[in-house]
Image (cartoon, grey):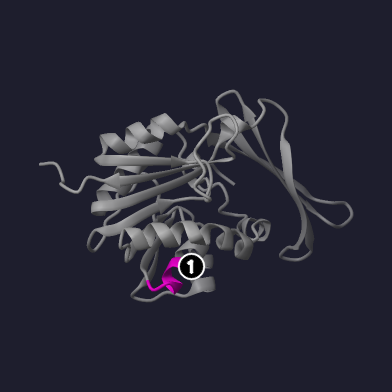
Amino acid sequence: MTNDQPFGDLVDVYEGLVDWPRRLAHEEPFYRQLFATHSVQRLVDVACGTGHHAAMFHRWGLTVEGSDVSPGMIERASQLHGRSDSLRWTVRGFEETIDPRSPFDAAICVGNSLALAGTHETADRVIGRMLAAVRPGGLVVVHVLNLWHLRDGPCQWQKCRRMPGPDRDLLVVKGVHRSGSAGYVDLIVATLDEPPRLKTESVPLLGLEADSLERAARRSGATQVDLFGGYDLRSYQRETSADLIMVAHRDECPRS
């Protein structure tokens, strides 16, 4: 596992840790309403992982491109969901320009992916590239974990699961913790044999602030920015919201 491809060699573990049907059912009403209101038909999913959001939108009849820096994630997305003229997958990192065949109606970067950008400057550039890739009046949606609702200090262990591995079962434990202005996703992966083989990883997360995301969006042409603390559209509260969701609307009249 490396910082530029933090889950690239643990695709199966990543898949096994997420209850995708439950997660998508929770988030679907938010996207349904947003996309219907703004006539979204073409969408790019930046840092799409194994492509479950992109595939859900494609099932609704949208034309979707999913991109991720990890070839393993993109390969798995293609295996799980197929590919066609209306569902494309591409290997592309945060520092690469999104080059659509024509402007998208919306660009999303969700599931805390933007917190893996490495630096705040990179995160700002990603938001700029997403806004540049959508049409005037188009949308950019960013979802990250709100680090500031976590206590500064010990890891908060979230999941402990047994799952099949390549040749034997694995025990996987996942947690998250905050240290000052940075966060970390902590993984412990152990084989269930004697003697067990143990792998541990601590992946750094940027501490992204609502006001800094909004400033980056407005600098890149967003004229309206909405901030939510969850997919139920509750208002964002820095100290208590588990999530931070930004919906940025690109200027209807592009600047000359």
Q: Can you say whether 88 is above or below 98 in the image?
A: below
Relative image position of residue 21 (x, y in whole percent): 61, 65
Image point (71%, 65%), residue name = 166
Image point (29%, 49%), residue name = 97
Q: Is residue 113 left or right of residue 192?
A: left
For label 1, the crowd category at 10 Å Cα-Cα, with few meaning under 14, some 14 to 19 and many 20 or more, is some
Q: Quadrant of residue 225?
A: top left
Of 135 and 65, nearer the camera is 135
Of 155 and 34, nearer the camera is 34
Asked if residue 188 can be seen in this view, the reply is no
Asked if residue 40 can be seen in this view, the reply is yes
What span is in magenta?
Answer: 57-61
Task: State yes or no: residue 226 in magenta.
Answer: no
Please state, as top left, top right, bottom left or bottom right, where the C terminus lies in the image. Answer: top left
Of 197 and 201, nearer the camera is 201
Q: Can you say whether 62 is above or below 10 in the image?
A: below
Relative image position of residue 134 (x, y in whole percent): 27, 53
According to the picture, the residue beneath numbered tag 1 turns out to be 56
Image point (67%, 28%), residue name = 151
Mark 1 residue element? helix
Relative image position of residue 33 (x, y in whole percent): 42, 59
Q: Amino acid at mark 1?
A: Met
Report the magenta stretch's main SS: helix
